[in-house]
């Protein structure tokens, strides 16, 4: 689906304590991968806890177009009858990945080493995002890509009929690029090697191993060296998708700054490639406790208890932590605005090529709400309003970006005057139950007339 038709303006206002249990939906990254790996396997993969956000539904539609059979059995319960590695059929229609960079980049990788072509498009946000970071390494396998200027969608990828394996060092920390290469490597003979100087989320590696691929990960001086042996037979699995820590971040951060709050978020990932936000919040003085640690769907998880934490202090986040909290900087900048002192977010240039330029989107919206912000190409600095409080009272732009919309709605919960968001529609891409979940905790988030 390329975008939603009518903007959905919303606003949030200063709220009483947030209380209760926040059962956030399934992990978006793992949901995309479960559908794609299921489609590349032999047999029937059974998935529970699948995120039914628009991004993942678009990937499901794409997997059908490439020949897999997908059936929805109930909320979050899906099965995928796969076609096996190298078994993708050529789609008859254009593949519309909507708002999802993960969807389009992973699917391009998965089809790039088969003798088929596919044309990809997306919404106005996705069609602005760079695809060269994926099509450059895919060209090394022998695939060709024809897109718009600057490597933008719409784009046709002609898969390699005779792929060769690849050795590639990631020029930027990107799990999407890493995953595209590994998925392409599945149908290339021999060993495909990806070297990542900075570790990024490792769900593809974990899940490939779970589906039966031979994959070795070594920590070497040059970084994480991932070696995949090509042309395995992937076997259908049962996948229990754990809850999304990037969605959990919104109720967690809101509860930290709304006075009197106390909430529990069950089953939050403790995967070290995803938990940089929690490390940062604890450094700021957040009252977070992790209870009942266990494993769910191959991922370490715990129940997170969050209590209102007065007197949060600004901190400096190191560049080396950026990848492990890359989607959480917008909501961290909201906590930073409510905290005391300066929060300096370093090494965040990748935020400029997300669903929106997230540094610019947060800086402009925070400034409109009376918060002092500084930015460089690679840094975002937020000056906390502390005891004086965040003024608020502005109309902010979500720019087709779900996390920007949710961040400003959380800001309004502590601001002196309500904060409006011009279009909260994009929230449906990743967190379709955000509105009722937050209302159930006691947050005043309502539809407005822009
Ligand atoms: C994702 C990787 C990250 C992240 C995105 C999901 C993934 O993007 O921002 O929301 O599932 O692999 P990059 O790989 O571009 O950093």
Image (tube, rainbow, N blue to C red):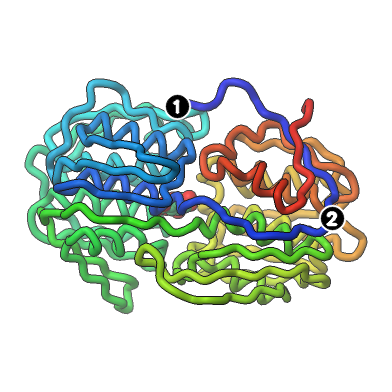
Q: Residues within 10 Å of mark 1 (few under 14, many from 20)?
A: some
* Residue appearing at x 59%, y 73% in the figure: 279
Q: Residue furthest front?
A: 74
Q: Quadrant of residue 252?
A: bottom right
At 38% from the left edge and 51% from the top edge, which residue is drawn?
48
Quadrant (top left, top right, bottom left, bottom right) of the C terminus? top right
Judged by depth in the image, the label closer to the viewer, 2 or 1, is 2
Q: Secondary structure at mark 1?
A: loop
* Residue 177 appears left or right of 143: right
Residue 17: x and y, percent?
A: 81, 59
302, 107: nearer the viewer: 302
Which quadrant would the N terminus be assigned to in this image? top left
216 shown above or below 110: below
Residue occupying the far right of the picture: 388
Task: Describe residue 424's horizontal placement relative to residue 300 as left or right.
Answer: right
Residue 16 numbered tag: 2
Q: How many marks?
A: 2
Looking at the image, residue 209 sits to the left or right of residue 155; the answer is left
Indicate the quadrant where residue 92 lies: top left
Residue in front for this viewpoint, 392 or 271: 271
Vertical relation: 376 (above or below) 150: below
Q: CA distance from mark 2 to mark 1?
A: 37 Å
Q: Is residue 227 above or below residue 42?
A: below
- What numbered label is drawn on residue 1? 1
Residue for point 80% across, 42% down: 419
Q: Where's residue 163, x and y in %?
A: 11, 45
Q: Label 2's element? A: loop
Name the residue located 60 percent from the left edge and 64 percent from the top edge: 346
Q: Is residue 68 visible?
A: yes
Question: Where residue 201 sits: x, y (%)?
Answer: 41, 62
């Amino acid at each position: 689906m390329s975008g939603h038709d009518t903007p959905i303006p919303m606003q949030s206002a200063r709220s009483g304590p947030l209380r209760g249990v926040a059962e956030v939906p399934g992990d978006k990254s793992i949901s995309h991968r479960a559908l794609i790996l299921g489609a590349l396997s032999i047999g029937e993969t059974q998935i529970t806890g699948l995120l039914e956000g628009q991004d993942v539904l678009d990937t499901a539609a794409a997997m059908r177009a490439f020949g897999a059979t997908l059936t929805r059995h109930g909320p979050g319960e899906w099965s995928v009858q796969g076609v096996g590695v190298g078994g993708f059929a050529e789609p008859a229609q254009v593949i519309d990945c909507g708002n999802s960079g993960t969807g389009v980049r992973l699917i391009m990788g998965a089809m790039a080493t088969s003798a088929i072509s596919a044309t990809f498009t997306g919404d106005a946000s996705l069609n602005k995002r760079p695809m060269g970071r994926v099509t450059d390494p895919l060209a090394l396998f022998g695939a060709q890509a024809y897109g718009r200027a600057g490597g933008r969608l719409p784009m046709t990828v002609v898969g390699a009929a005779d792929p060769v394996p690849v050795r590639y060092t990631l020029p930027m920390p990107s799990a999407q690029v890493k995953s595209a290469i590994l998925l392409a490597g599945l149908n290339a003979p021999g060993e495909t090697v990806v070297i990542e100087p900075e570790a990024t989320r490792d769900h593809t590696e974990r899940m490939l191993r779970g589906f039966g691929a031979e994959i070795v990960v070594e920590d070497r001086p040059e970084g994480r060296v991932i070696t995949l042996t090509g042309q395995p037979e992937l076997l259908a699995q049962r996948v229990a998708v754990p809850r999304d820590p990037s969605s959990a971040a919104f109720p967690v951060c809101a509860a930290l700054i709304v006075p009197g709050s106390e909430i529990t978020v069950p089953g939050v990932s403790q995967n070290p490639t995803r938990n940089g936000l929690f490390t940062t919040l604890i450094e700021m003085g957040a009252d977070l406790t992790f209870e009942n640690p266990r494993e769910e769907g191959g991922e370490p998880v715990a129940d997170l208890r969050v209590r209102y934490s007065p007197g949060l202090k600004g901190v400096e986040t190191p560049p080396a932590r950026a990848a492990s909290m890359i989607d959480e900087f917008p909501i961290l900048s909201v906590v930073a605005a409510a905290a005391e002192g300066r929060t300096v977010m370093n090494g965040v240039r990748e935020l400029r090529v997300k669903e929106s330029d997230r540094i610019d989107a947060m800086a402009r919206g925070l400034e409109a709400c009376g918060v002092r912000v500084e930015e460089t190409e690679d840094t975002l600095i937020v000056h906390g309003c502390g005891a004086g409080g965040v003024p608020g009272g502005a109309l902010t732009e979500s720019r087709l970006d779900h996390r920007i919309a949710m961040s400003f709605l959380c800001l309004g919960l502590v601001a002196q005057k309500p904060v409006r968001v011009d279009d909260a529609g994009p929230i449906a891409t990743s967190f379709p139950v955000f509105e009722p979940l937050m209302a159930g905790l006691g947050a005043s988030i309502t539809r407005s007339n822009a």
